[in-house]
């Protein structure tokens, strides 16, 4: 079985609609794919309507979080949430809050860039998102389209980097609270790309242990942004903490060069994940 548990559609910051994403998954030979758009479940219904026969779709989301313990600035991190109840009141309210945070932050970044002379316009970026959750990737795409940078990755490495004068922070969910929210909604929380040092600061093992104590059920180990050493370390830590090990592409369509199914999850780990989720069910034949 080929299993990819982390993909994004145009409902958040991917470039393919849910239907196009599932067609790509089918064409790549995947048996199971998870739809994990940022802070939203808006793509679930479209995925259910468009699911090709023979492809199992795991409904999910990538929750924007931060680690707040200890001294220094918060560390940004992401929590993959699978099989939760999308109508759970507390989790639904937090999704709505995060969406507003993203919108406010995006507009502030664009206002700062435009004020410095860069040819970007907030209303056009919102329109181009076609109702999706607008975030920095949309701003990056606008910078590419305007010829300011050559790629989305270049935009993130420069103008949208957290050290850029145009960067604006947002009030993400405390990760321990996020884990508890996902569990309360019957979902399965998995720490996404937790040691991707190429992205910036990462949390230490004590933080991951605290997350496991709060109810974390898995670690995304095999990820394109993890080195071999980082994967080995996370795999060992997952064994020590009794956590499920997942692997995935973090596919974003043409916004990133990584192809779907670049990394995958073992079938027995998927079974453990599915057994733990009670808030919703996989879409399958």
Image (cartoon, rainbow, N blue to C red):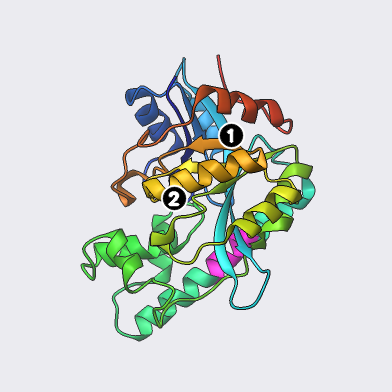
Identify the secondary structure beneath mark 2.
Answer: helix
Per the image, the residue denoted by label 1 is 59
Q: Nearer the viewer, residue 193 or 208?
A: 208
Percent across and percent down for residue 36 are 53, 42
Residue 139 belongs to magenta span? no
The structure residue drawn at horizontal position 51% and vertical position 62%, both measured from the top left corner, is: 202
Report the span colored magenta.
Answer: 98-104
Residue 230, numbered label: 2
The crowding category of the residue bearing disc 1, from other C-alpha atoms within 10 Å (few below 14, some 14 to 19, many at least 20), is many
Does residue 117 sit above or below 265 in this rendering?
A: below
At a point 35% along the width and 64% down the height, the residue shown is 140
Q: Is residue 264 left or right of residue 278?
A: left
Q: Position of residue 215 (x, y in %)?
A: 73, 46
Name the side, left or right, on which 159 lies relative to 54: left
> Can residue 100 be found in the magenta stretch?
yes
Up/down of 246 relative to 80, above or below = above
Image position of 56 (left or right of 115): right
Instruction: Decide which of 232, 145 is in the foreground and name it.
Output: 232
Ranked by sequence position, the earlier of labels 2 and 1 is: 1
Q: Residues within 10 Å of mark 2 (few under 14, many from 20)?
A: some
């Amino acid at each position: 079985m080929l299993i990819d548990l982390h993909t994004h559609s145009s409902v958040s910051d991917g470039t393919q609609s849910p239907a196009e994403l599932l067609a790509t998954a089918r064409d790549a030979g995947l048996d199971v794919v998870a739809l994990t758009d940022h802070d939203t479940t808006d793509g679930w219904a479209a995925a259910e309507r468009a699911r090709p026969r023979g492809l199992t779709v795991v409904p999910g989301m990538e929750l924007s979080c931060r680690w707040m313990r200890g001294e220094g600035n918060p560390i940004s991190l992401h929590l993959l949430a699978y099989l939760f109840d999308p109508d759970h009141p507390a989790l639904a309210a937090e999704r709505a809050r995060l969406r507003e945070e993203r919108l406010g932050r995006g507009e502030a970044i664009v206002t700062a860039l435009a004020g410095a002379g860069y040819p970007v316009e907030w209303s056009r970026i919102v329109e181009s998102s076609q109702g999706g959750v607008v975030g920095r990737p949309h701003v990056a795409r606008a910078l590419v389209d305007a010829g300011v940078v050559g790629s989305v990755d270049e935009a993130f490495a420069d103008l949208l980097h957290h050290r850029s004068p145009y960067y604006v922070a947002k009030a993400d969910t405390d990760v321990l609270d996020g884990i508890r929210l996902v569990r309360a909604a019957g979902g399965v929380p998995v720490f996404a790309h937790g040691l991707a040092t190429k992205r910036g600061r990462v949390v230490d093992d004590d933080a991951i242990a605290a997350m496991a104590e709060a109810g974390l059920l898995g670690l995304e180990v095999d990820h394109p942004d993890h080195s071999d050493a980082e994967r080995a370390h996370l795999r060992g830590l997952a064994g020590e903490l009794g956590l499920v090990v997942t692997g995935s592409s973090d596919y974003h369509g043409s916004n990133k060069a990584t192809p779907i199914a670049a990394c995958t999850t073992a079938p027995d780990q998927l079974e453990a994940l599915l057994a733990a989720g009670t808030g919703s069910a996989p879409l399958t034949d």
